[in-house]
Structures are given as C-alpha cells and as structure tokens.
Amino acid sequence: MRTLRLIFIISLLLVTVGFISWSDSSASENNGAEKISVSKDAKPNVSNVNYDNLGTMIASWYGPGFHGKLTANGETYNQMALTAAHKEMPFGTFLRITNQKNGKSVIVRINDRGPYIEGRDLDLSMGTAIVLGMVHKGVIRVKVEEISLDNFNPPFATLN
C-alpha cells in the first residue's frame, strides 16, 4: 500500500510539473515561434578565459550601513550582490577571489572604491563574504585573479 501511494504521488507530481503530457502535442511543435536555421558550417563564438594572478591581498567586507546607497560608479549598492571595492581597479573588472583558509572562491565585479582602512586591499560585499565563509572573521587573506576574455572589451559600466 505504501509503495502504491508513493507511485501515485510521484505520478501526480510529474503530470503537474508537465513531464508527462496527456495532450497530443509533440516535441516538434514550436507554438508559433519562428524557426531558426543554423548553417552546418557555423562555428561557436568562443573566447579564451584568462586568469591573471594578482597575488595575495587582505580583504574585509562591508554591507548593512551602505545597502541602498550609491557606489562610486553610480549604481545602488546591494549588500548581497557579488561585488567588491578597490582603490584603483577600473569599474567593471571581474576578479576571482579565493579564501586561502578554506579554498572557497567566488567571482566578483569591481563597482566601488575602498577600503579606507590602512592595510586592507579589497572591501567585499556581504554576499561575497558569505560565499567565502568570512563573515564571522571579518578580515582575511585572499588570492586574487583578474578575469579577462580574449577579443572582448567589456562595456564601460556594468550593472547588477
């Protein structure tokens, strides 16, 4: 009885979600969408991703007191976004930040200026600090790599 009930519940979920369709529609239908044809000779537009090691830096995090206020690049600060502040790096620079103690890493975008405390190189958003597991510690040593793509010029300003 228990197995039968489990099978019934799974079947009901599959029908509800749409994995099993009771209508006579086929996978070849496109619901009125225009067909797109691709040449057999088409090649994907692929760029190499480069990681330029910038070394080790001291990172802290900031958040609650600045949430909703404007950053140095003019966007509204979101403490849960994966962003960072640096004194000189161009806005829109993407970095891979790795916590050297636990190996956790995250990709962030530079959107603000700081930190303004001597001895610190990066101010990370609270969301970034959560991903790196550094909220409680507050200040940690991180490995920093700049991310770039071959043949790609990022726009002047990028937003969350």
Image (cartoon, rainbow, N blue to C red):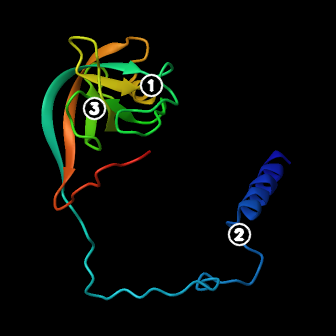
- Left or right side of 25 for 130: left
The kind of secondary structure element at disc 3 is strand
The kind of secondary structure element at disc 1 is helix
Q: Residue 105 at x, y = what percent?
A: 32, 33
Mark closer to the chain start, 3 or 1: 3
Amino acid type indicated by mark 2? Ile
The kind of secondary structure element at disc 2 is loop
Q: Residues within 10 Å of mark 3 (few under 14, many from 20)?
A: many
- Left or right side of 136 for 103: left
Amino acid type indicated by mark 3? Ile
Residue 128 visible in the current orientation? yes
Q: Residues within 10 Å of mark 1 (few under 14, many from 20)?
A: many
Mark number displayed over residue 97: 3
Distance CA(mark 1)–CA(mark 2): 42 Å
Residue ID for mark 1:
126
Mark closer to the chain start, 1 or 2: 2
Mark number displayed over residue 43: none
Q: Nearer the viewer, mark 3 or mark 2?
A: 3
Q: Residues within 10 Å of mark 2 (few under 14, many from 20)?
A: few
Residue 105 visible in the current orientation? no
Q: Looking at the rendering, which quadrant does residue 118 occupy?
A: top left
Q: Residue 160 at x, y = what percent?
A: 44, 45
- Left or right side of 149 for 75: right
Amino acid type indicated by mark 1? Met
Q: Residue 96 at x, y = what percent?
A: 27, 37
Q: Looking at the rendering, which quadrant does residue 30 occupy?
A: bottom right
- Left or right side of 80 for 98: left
